[in-house]
Amino acid sequence: MLPRSTALLLALALPSACTSPSANTSEGDGSSTAVADDSSSTADSTVSATASTTDTTGPTSSTSSMTGSTMSTTDPSSSTGPQGCAGDDECGGPGTPICIDQVCSPCESDAQCAAKDPANPACRDDGQCVQCTASNDDGCGGATPICDAAVNTCMGCAFHEQCPDSACRIATGECFDEADVHTVGAGQDFEDFTAAAGSLGAEMAVLRVASGVDFNEAIVLSGSSAVWAILDANPDDDTLPLWARTSGNTSTLSIDAGAEVYIQGISVSGNIGSSMFPGIAVDNASLYLDRAWVVANLGGGISLDNGGYALVRNSFVGGVLDIPAVTASDSTLEGFYSSLIGSAGESASVMCNAGATVTVRNSLLLSRADAASDIQCSNASISDSVTEANFPGGSNITTVGVMGATESMSWFAGYASGNFHLTPMAPAAILTAAQWQAGDPLVDIDGDARPGVDGSADVAGADIP
């Protein structure tokens, strides 16, 4: 028999045969335990030992066991522990969209984003894949051709400057196709509007009109396939193309039967043929007017009839004796930052019937008619604008008192000719009557900058003096 001290040493070195390996192994903590039972110390007693090792730092583990003289080993390659990403499609977090070295990571290039998701092909500075950025608008097109870099989202165009190679079809938010662009003027693609209408009248067309050229003619654009944009070819030139019909009983431009016309930087003025026809007549069709002049026409500025629509921004529109600047009959007028100025008699700034929808904001609505007759459209919605007398139901309206003959000549640079640029003699209240809102024009009729900050006070009307 072994001495008791020797038996005790053996018991400490080797666990008892009745000890279960599972009971003596702590799962996943890499430890092993041994329990000695000194109640039995015979020489032929069975001795077992269990050693267990689990690697908690990697995807694989190995276990070896020995019972008596038997040992078994498990191959660590058979483990199914957690693995890294195998491709970009496994990376769903917005800040870690790309799989790099089996780790979902921020994007590092536009190419990575385009390869993962063509709908979000731009890599933003913070590593997210987005629709577009200020330097990459490849994901924009169709009805959303413009990148709003502030929110990295594609949107429709609203101003022609956003489509520098063609023009903006504001009704749909699309840019006109560059193939539809033509020039008008002496030595250009078309000598005048009559020639262009004869060739392109029922098509999509962008006409870039030579500056300083006068066109004495009248045309009619009819039908829904007639979608035209007529733009000043040199907007930085102070001399606008002048389109005037000096004879005949017709409007300078007639738009009907679903046609759609965009005008920017053109003066449709001086139609002296008849007081029965305005400068622009819109009948069941659409007109979009930006930074334009429609003044000094014997038949008034613009007429809207039978479901006609007009968006008038940053423009001068004038009426003449007894004829308003704009009339709307069962039609819709939206006016923003425009100077709608009437003459004497019944020449209101705006006249409409009960079936019309009229919304005017940030504008001048004045006339030399009696102050109570300046706006002959009781159902109009007018806000942040300047009138002579308070308009019932309007909001944030600034009143400046009666504009008589003397005032009209001193407030404007050339009232008689329809030049409604403000002079230093104009009421100071006009300078802060408007309130710029997101989506409003960023410039005035001459290209001078507007505030561009939501809620900022601004000059009412088309001109910043």
Image: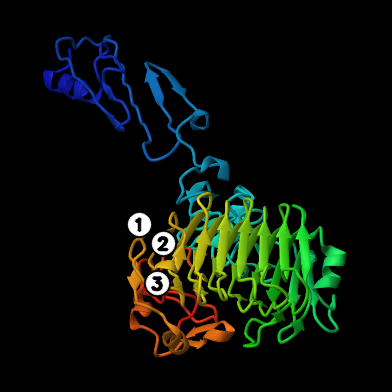
Residue displayed at 74% across by 77% down: 245
Q: In which quarter of the image is residue 246?
A: bottom right
Q: Which of marks 1 and 2 is nearer the N terminus?
A: 2
Q: Is residue 76 above or below residue 144?
A: above
* Type of colouring: rainbow
Q: Is residue 178 above or below residue 94?
A: below
**Callout 1 amino acid:** Gly
Residue displayed at 52% across by 32% down: 77
Q: In which quarter of the image is residue 388?
A: bottom left
CA gap, disc 2 and disc 3: 16 Å
**Residue 382, which numbered label?**
2
Instruction: Assign a secondary structure to mark 2.
Output: strand
- Residue 173 in picture, x, y percent from top left: 61, 57
**Callout 3 amino acid:** Ala
Q: Do the residues labelled 1 and 2 touch (CB within 8 Å)?
A: yes
**Residue 371, which numbered label?**
3
Residue at label 1?
393
**Around disc 3, counting alpha carbons within 10 Å, would you say few (fewer than 14), some (14 to 19), or many (20 or more)?**
some
Q: In which quarter of the image is residue 162?
A: bottom right
Q: Which image quarter holds the N terminus?
A: top left
- Residue 333 in picture, x, y percent from top left: 54, 59
CA gap, disc 1 and disc 3: 16 Å
- Residue 385 in picture, x, y percent from top left: 40, 69
Query: Of residues 10 and 183, which is closer to you in this image?
Result: 183
